[in-house]
Amino acid sequence: MTKQETIIAPIEQVPFDDLYVSDLNPRTVFSPEGIEALAENIRQLGLIQNLAGLRDETGKVGIVAGGRRLRALALLQDDPRFASVSVKIAPDQATAEIWASSENHHREQPHAADEIREYGSMAERGVPVPSIAIAFGVNEKHVYRRLKLASLPVSVLDALKAGEITLSNAAAFTVSEDEANTLAVLEKVRGEGYSDHQIKQMLKPDSVRSTDRRVKFVGLEAYEAEGGRVTGDLFADQTYFDDVALLDELFKAKLNATAEALTGDGWKWAEAMDTTYLGYYEIEERKLDRIYRDEGTLTEEQSERYDELAELAEGEVLDAEGEAELAALQAVLDGAFSAEQKAVSGVLVYVNQSGEVQTAEGLVTREDRAAAIEAGFLRKSSHSSAEAEPKSPISQKLRDDLSRVAQGARQHAVLRDPDLLIDLLAYQLSHALRWNDPLGIATTEVPNWPSTEAEGYALDERLTSNPPRDMWDAKDLGASFRAFRKKGPEHVRGELVRFLAAQYRGGDEKLAAMIDKETQPNIREVWTPNAANFFSRVGGPYLNDLWRDLLDLSDDHPTATSFAKLKKGEKADKLEALFRGDHDLRSALGVTDEQAAKIGAWLPEGMK
């Protein structure tokens, strides 16, 4: 066949039952939803474009162009109008093959800007959205979005047609209700590659999104009831709250009302805080003490049920009734503050980033401390006086070192349970725990080594040694990784466990307590106080008190008074020998089994 030859291809009415999709038809992937939409389009508008096919030796016709239309017609066989179909019949196999490929390769989609204008034009003529959806073979949500774009200033659609902005950029402009600002921003972003987010920020610089914690806490209904204005972003399923001053006012009012309601619940005081997180430092800075509710206990049957429900909740398959049951069991475990506790303490109230009310309860002010001590809710400090608390004999640097030692002991203990560590890793990676992460992974350092050379401190070497790695010197990291894998799963697991143990830092208060309960860390298993790491770093009076306390001596006992006359270095050395278990010294002092146990378990104040 040459370019000059005329193709004679008659159009015939062929019974639908004699039609099938030919193997020559190149389109094999299609959407069932798209076929259904096309069927509805044909039902209402008719078959606008004929099918094309090749008659086989049996007299049936294989469709080479129009496979989607044929599948749509199959859904319309309840309508007698489509019992037979107009088909252009190819004269031979070669022509049919050309038709099969030509229809798809020469199909040209209209530019998005032209399509948007066409949608808008149909809507202006009064064509309803469902009919537009049928005409274009799309869902109604797509039509609404196109019509939103059609309402943009002409200049925005012209910029889209010229390739100066993207389709998603154009969608970003729909959040604006100020045409002058829209055009000003358009001139700034033309051809500059601005992101959709940046464009929205320029269009709505003083608005906040519906994801803002203030919005979540106040609620759309309360905001609009006070006259607050919102703007919808149809393309991002987002809403912009335009009256930020009003939102702030409503947020503060609701937060203060929440705090006032807590005082009505028995707390002596409640204070609202405009923060998203309340750290321990805030409580320390305010010089607040803390008392805790008495935790409840579950029966064996309740414990089994709690574990069952918690597992279902973790898998997100717990129904509302189960959630209520789990919450009731959790309330039993959490316990409650008594009326007497509330009478001497208060609450700090804040809203987190998710818009949820958070509280720090059982906080005792300096003014109420004496009453809390008298009621038995707080212990009186052994270093306190009626007038003022003296400076602690333990320096901040030493406290930091002792804290590191305590952290090392926890890591030492958790290293014994690799499965727990791996479970913790999976838990942390699958939950947004943020600052309560139990493992200090990646950029977080979890120090476990004192600032001085740690005499008397012996952690598992897997926590302190770092075997040389070849990754920095390797010229082929792929080969290096293959060599690492060849060492086997036990080596890989051992390296993972070692790393996780060294990164362990606890998590929040309840999670850390649970892990401690399972692993039973013992600081004295890894650390023994001696002259270098402790005794030489505190004052002489502190050592005198410690000596008397460990040996149960009165102030005027000769062993106490002779010790007090020693130089500080001598005192440190003698205490080191006592803790080291020097047999001669302990014999000379007549150390009893009870005193030996006290020495073996002793830890500096604040070290847990």
Image (cartoon, helix red, strand yellow):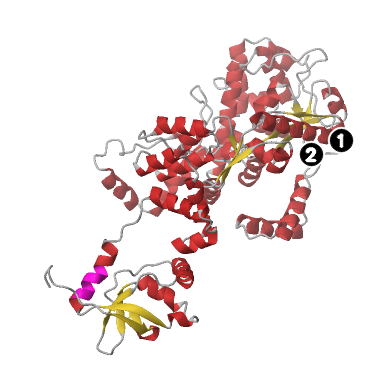
Q: Secondary structure at mark 2?
A: loop
The rendered magenta stretch, by its main secondary structure, is classed as helix
Foreground: 198 or 463?
198
Q: How many numbered marks are there?
A: 2
Foreground: 125 or 402?
125
Q: Is residue 410 visible?
A: no
Identify the residue at image location x=59%, y=28%.
403
Foreground: 230 or 438?
230
The kind of residue on which mark 1 rests is Gly
The kind of residue on which mark 2 rests is Arg
Image location (x, y in percent) of residue 200: 50, 36
Q: Quadrant of residue 536?
A: top right
Task: Please name which of the two marks, 1 or 2, marks the residue nearer to the observer.
Answer: 1
Q: Is residue 474 left or right of residue 348?
A: left
Q: Is residue 272 left or right of residue 424?
A: right
The N terminus lies in quadrant: bottom left
The region drawn magenta spans 95-101
Q: Quadrant of residue 74?
A: bottom left
Q: Return the residue at label 2.
A: 293
Image location (x, y in percent) of residue 46: 44, 72
Q: Is residue 5 left or right of residue 379?
A: left
Q: Answer with mark 1 or mark 2, whichever residue precedes in sequence.
A: 1
Q: Is residue 188 visible?
A: yes
Image location (x, y in percent) of residue 40: 49, 70
- The single residue placed furthest to the front in the displayed view is 125
Q: Return the mark for residue 264.
A: 1
Q: Secondary structure at mark 1?
A: loop
The C terminus lies in quadrant: top right
- Callout 1 environment at 10 Å: few (<14), some (14 to 19), or many (20+)? few
Q: Quadrant of residue 269?
A: top right
Foreground: 602 or 589?
602
